Amino acid sequence: MLYQLGSSTVSIKGQVVIPIEVRKKLHINPGTSVVFLTDEHGKIYLDLKETIQIEKQIKALEQGEKLIKKMKKNKKIIDVMKDFRNDGS
């Protein structure tokens, strides 16, 4: 279910003020970097840039764990690297 946290009007320069309710909920302060995301349905989402970076780091760690598991199975390092590169595509 969706709840409206506020609204804003786009200025002539294409700028909007993020409503105070949203800034409080996401802990957005002056200087905070945000990103705009979209899904396959065209919905637009706002999130903190640091959240996205953390999610990318988690994914990289998970890929590293897969690599280690494959190495523990005594696979040849060449095969492990080929598999890892193919998984990350």
Image (tube, grey):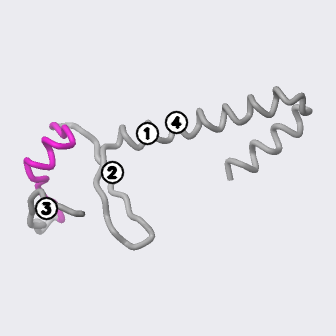
Dot 2 alpha-carbon crowd within 10 angstroms: few under 14, some 14 to 19, many 20 or more = few
The residue shown at (21%, 42%) is 26
User: Residues at badges 4 and 1 in contact (C-beta under 8 Å)?
Assistant: no
On screen, 25 above or below 67? below
In-image side of 42 versus 83 (left or right) = left
To which residue does mark 1 refer? Answer: 53
Please say whether residue 54 is one of the residues in the magenta stretch: no
In x, y percent, where is residue 45?
31, 59
For marks 4 and 1, the one nearer the N-term is: 1
> Which stretch did the figure color magenta?
14-29
To which residue does mark 4 refer? Answer: 58
- Element type where label 3 sits in the image: loop
* Separation of marks 3 and 2 at Cα, in angstroms: 19 Å
For marks 1 and 3, the one nearer the N-term is: 3
Mark 1 belongs to which amino acid? Gln
The residue shown at (71%, 48%) is 87
* Separation of marks 4 and 2 at Cα, in angstroms: 18 Å
- Element type where label 2 sits in the image: strand
Which label is found at residue 35? Answer: 2
In x, y percent, where is residue 12?
11, 68
Mark 3 belongs to which amino acid? Gln
Which label is found at residue 4? Answer: 3
Dot 4 alpha-carbon crowd within 10 angstroms: few under 14, some 14 to 19, many 20 or more = few
* Separation of marks 2 and 1 at Cα, in angstroms: 11 Å
Query: 2 or 79: nearer the eye?
Result: 2
